[in-house]
Amino acid sequence: MTLAATTELAAATNENLASISNTLIYSAMAVYTLAFFAYIAEWLLGSRSKVGRTAAALTATTAAKGPAVTAGKKGGTAVLERPQVVVRSAAGARDVPDGPGAHGGDEQGDMYGRIAISLTVLAFLVELGGVIARAASVERAPWGNMYEFNLTFSTVAVGVYLGLLALRKNVRWLGLFLITSVLLDLGLAVTVLYTASDQLVPALHSYWLYIHVSTAIFCGAVFYVGAVATILYLFKDAYENKLATGGKPGKFANSVLDRLPASASLDKFAYRVNAAVFPLWTFTIIAGAIWAGDAWGRYWGWDPKETWSFITWVAYACYLHARATAGWKGRKAAYLAMIAFGCWLFNYYGVNIFVSGKHSYAGV
C-alpha cells in the first residue's frame, strides 16, 4: 500500500470516528431528555413535604422545645414523641427542617427518581464515549475549540453530580436543574458552536494542554454545581422568609421549594463546593502562566483570557474571604458567589467568542 493510500485511509478512519462521536453525542442528548422527563415525574408524582409549610416550623422555639410527653389513652402509657430534626439557618434567626427531597418521601416518586438517575448514568457514559471518540478522531485531547470544551464541560458536570451521589451525598434534588442546563449546553454545542474535527493550532501542541485545560474544565464544572446550589438557596431563602412572616407562597413554591433542603443547608453546600475547588483554580492559573512562558516567551501578558481568569480568581477569593473573616453568610455571600460565577461564565463564553486575543480558539 502506498503512503498516499495509507494517509487517505487514516483520514477516512478519523472521519469515521468523528461521525461516531457525533452520533454518540446526539444519542446522549436523547437519553438526557428521557432522564429529564423522569426527573419531572419524580417532582410531580412524589408527595409534597409536610415540613416547613407553616410559620411555626420556622420559629426557633420549635427547636428549643425538648421531647414532648403525650399521654396515651386512659390506663395507657405516656408516649415520648421524637423531637423534630432541624438545621440552624444562616442568619441564626430561625430553625428550618430540611425538605425530604425531590421524591418527597413517596415510593412512586422515589421509583421515578431512581429511573432518572439510571438514565443519567447511561447518558453520561454515552456522552463520555462521544468525547473519547472525538479525541481519537484526531489523536489529541478533545479541547481544541468551544464545541469540544462544551462537550467535556457538560460531561464533567454530570460526573461531579454522579460522584457526589456515589459518595452518598444527598444531592438528588440537583438532578433536574443540572440535566436541564446540560441539555441546553449540548444544544448550544451542536448548533451554534459545532466545529468539524481538526488538528490543533501550533501553540496548543504541549503536554500543558492536558494539565491546564483539564483542570480548568473540572473547576468550571464544580463552580457550576456551586452556582446551581446558590441559585436554589436564594429561592428557598425567599420562600422561608415568606412563611416566617405569615405569607402564603404559590402552588409552585409549595410543590418544589418545600422539598429542597433548608436554605442553610444549600448555603453550606455551595460554600463547601466553591471552597474545595478554589485551590485547584489557583493551580489552573499558575499552570496557564507556565504554559504561556513556554509557548509565547512570557508568563503573563494581560491577554483577555488571562485577565478574566484573574478577575474570576479575585471574585471567588473575595467570596471565600468574606465568609471566613467577615462572617458573611446567606444572601450577601450568595450574591458574591453569583458575581464570581458570572465572571467565570464570561471568561468561558464571552472571551472565547467575542474577544480577540492569543486564546481565541473558539473555532466559531
Image (tube, rainbow, N blue to C red):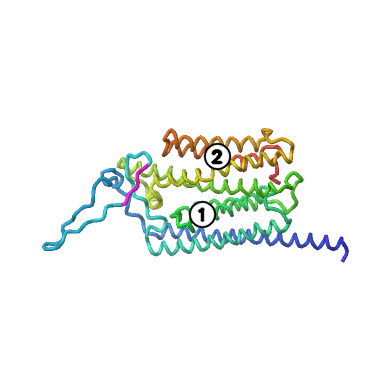
* Residue 239 part of the magenta segment: no
Residue 17: percent from the left, percent from the top? Answer: 71, 61
Left/right placement of residue 254 relative to residue 172 reads left
Which residue in the rendered view is the most extreme toward the bottom?
A: 1
Q: Amino acid at mark 1?
A: Tyr
Mark 2 or mark 1, which is nearer to you? 1
Residue 248: percent from the left, percent from the top? Answer: 33, 45
Q: In what quadrant of the picture does the N terminus appear? A: bottom right
Of pointers 2 and 1, the one earlier in the residue sequence: 1
The residue located at (46%, 39%) in the rendering is 334
Q: Amino acid at mark 2?
A: Gly
Q: Which secondary structure, mark 1?
A: helix
> Which label sits on residue 161?
1
User: Is the stretch drawn in magenta largely helix, strand or loop?
Assistant: loop
Q: Nearer the viewer, residue 223 or 350?
A: 223
Q: Is residue 58 above or below residue 107?
A: above
Residue bearing the label numbered 2: 342
Q: Nearer the viewer, residue 313 or 172?
A: 313
Q: Nearer the viewer, residue 155 or 328?
A: 328
Which residue in the rendered view is the most extreme toward the right?
A: 2
- The CA distance from mark 2 to mark 1 is 21 Å
The residue located at (30%, 42%) in the rendering is 246
> Which label sits on residue 244?
none
The residue located at (78%, 62%) in the rendering is 12
Q: Is residue 144 above or below residue 134?
A: above
Residue 279: percent from the left, percent from the top? Answer: 55, 42
Question: 10 Å neighbourhood of mark 2: few (<14), some, or many (≥20)?
Answer: some
Q: Are marks 2 and 1 in contact (CB under 8 Å)?
A: no
Q: Quadrant of residue 286?
A: top right
The stretch of residues the image draws in magenta is 85-89
Left/right placement of residue 121 relative to residue 14 reads left
Question: 10 Å neighbourhood of mark 1: few (<14), some, or many (≥20)?
Answer: many
